[in-house]
Amino acid sequence: MSCSTPSRFHSWRARVALACGFSIALVACEDEAPTAVDLDLLPPEPVTIAIELPWADFGSNLGVYGGYSAPALLAESIVARSYGTDSLDARTLLRFTSFPTSASVLDAGTPRTDTDLSYFGGYVVVFFDPVASTNTGPVSLGLGALEEAWHPPSATWDFALDTVGEQRAWSEQGAGPVTPLTTRDWDPAMGDSVQLFLDSAQVVGWNDPTDPASGARIELLTEGVRLRVIGGALRIFARSSINPDTVLSLTAQAQDVTFVYDVDPAPPLDGMRVGGAPSWRTVLDVAVPSSLTGPPGLCAAVGCPFALAPRHVSYAALVLRTRSPAEAFQPTDSLALDVRPVLSRAALPKSPLGNSLIADPAGHRVDAAAFAVEGAPVEIPVTGYVKAFLGGPDPAGRPPPGTLALLAAPEPGSFTFAEFFGPGGANEPVLKLIVTVSPPMELQ
């Protein structure tokens, strides 16, 4: 165990004051006000000590599980080409809603609804997050039309459909083949979006979202880059039958968005991983000791062994040390982590989870810079959990959960993931406790 120096520590001793005798009182007590407080009669001041419990004193049975959720549920998507040491390739797939069938146009100054529109072209607009993308200059993108039926919730690099009951592979890995449509450069210095223009025939081919083969594939043509895509839509140019000189710009939203990628990272054998899409979780058993035999500062203040109770704990946190993930999955934006109790360890990896132990409903955010170095400390507060664990069974007789899961908030929360060192070594997880105790009173 290690500790910080006690914030306040004095060798306080309570003393029993003797009453002054009549003849002595005039001398010994003449300078004391009748109502003054004798500081030696006050209880000892509380002592606050920071304690770090090593892994062996609180943790066991660390495990990493993957495959939770799916890229299609992520609020973003990815395109990449030969990025990182793993040479990541990733492509974004979109399926658009039906085209608008009517529009309001002016006829001699009077608005009228036109239901006979003629489509004659348009463009796919793609929005990027320049901050979370790795390029610093222009990159080239390609747009193609999918040719095979695909299932947006389950599509992967290898499979157009990948469910429990059925698998169907793409004819070409990476969501292929496609009909090439157009290419365009995107320069982040010019804005956060790119427009890929199409002719009439190319546009009309996406006007039926019930067609299982309907869809667009966006890929990077520039190597060594990974981009975060935060949205896309199809803008359609249409001519009015009421007023042929009126050109309308209509929008078909992207009703299905997902991405496929070709790198399947293996779970760490000696560490922890949280996040990604599909997501990873780290599970560990926790047993908060009810009796402490150190550190020396605690023993000097209150004696050891010391019975640790919920009232003594003012703060508790899991302290993890970062480890840099593979470059393809290196975070470029902050990640949000969550901690939840595992309700049935025997049901892992499919065990239901309890409510979050994190006070912030958005999770505990960790800056991306922490994962660019090795060993940066990340504190995840779990004060309420530790207090409840020390308090024993609840009023219904249920013991506190002894297994916790670290996961993304939400899940999936990002294509990238967090990694931390596991047990053993200088960077292993520790349980940090801020303990406030009152030294015992002594009679003298």
Image (cartoon, rainbow, N blue to C red):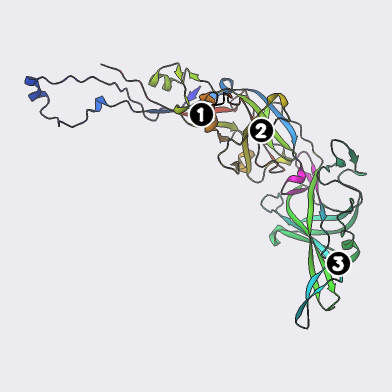
- Disc 3 is placed on an element classified as strand
Q: Which residues are magenta?
A: 70-93
- Disc 2 is placed on an element classified as loop
Relative to residue 98, is residue 436 depicted above or below?
above
Whether label 2 touches label 1, CB < 8 Å:
no
Q: Depth check: 344 or 336 in front? A: 344
Residue 143 in the image: state x and y as whole percent: 84, 56
- Residue 111's image quarter? bottom right
C-alpha gap between disc 3 and disc 1:
64 Å
Position of 129 with respect to 317 (left or right) is right
Relative to residue 166, is residue 235 depicted above or below?
below
Mark identifier at residue 353:
2
| Identity of the residue drawn at 74% across and 55% down | 231
Query: Which amino acid lies under the numbered mark 1 shown in the image of this protein?
Result: Lys
The answer to whether one can see residue 46 in this image is yes
Magenta stretch encompasses residue 316:
no
The residue tagged 3 is 121
Query: Which amino acid lies under the numbered mark 3 shown in the image of this protein?
Result: Gly
Magenta stretch encompasses residue 80:
yes
- Residue 279's image quarter? top right
C-alpha gap between disc 2 and disc 3:
50 Å
Mark identifier at residue 387:
1
Q: Residue furthest left?
A: 23
Residue 266 in the image: state x and y as whole percent: 76, 31
Q: Earlier in the sequence, mark 2 or mark 1?
A: 2
The mark lying in front, picked from 3 and 1, is 1
Q: Residue furthest front?
A: 396
| Identity of the residue drawn at 40% across and 27% down | 6
| Identity of the residue drawn at 87% across and 47% down | 150
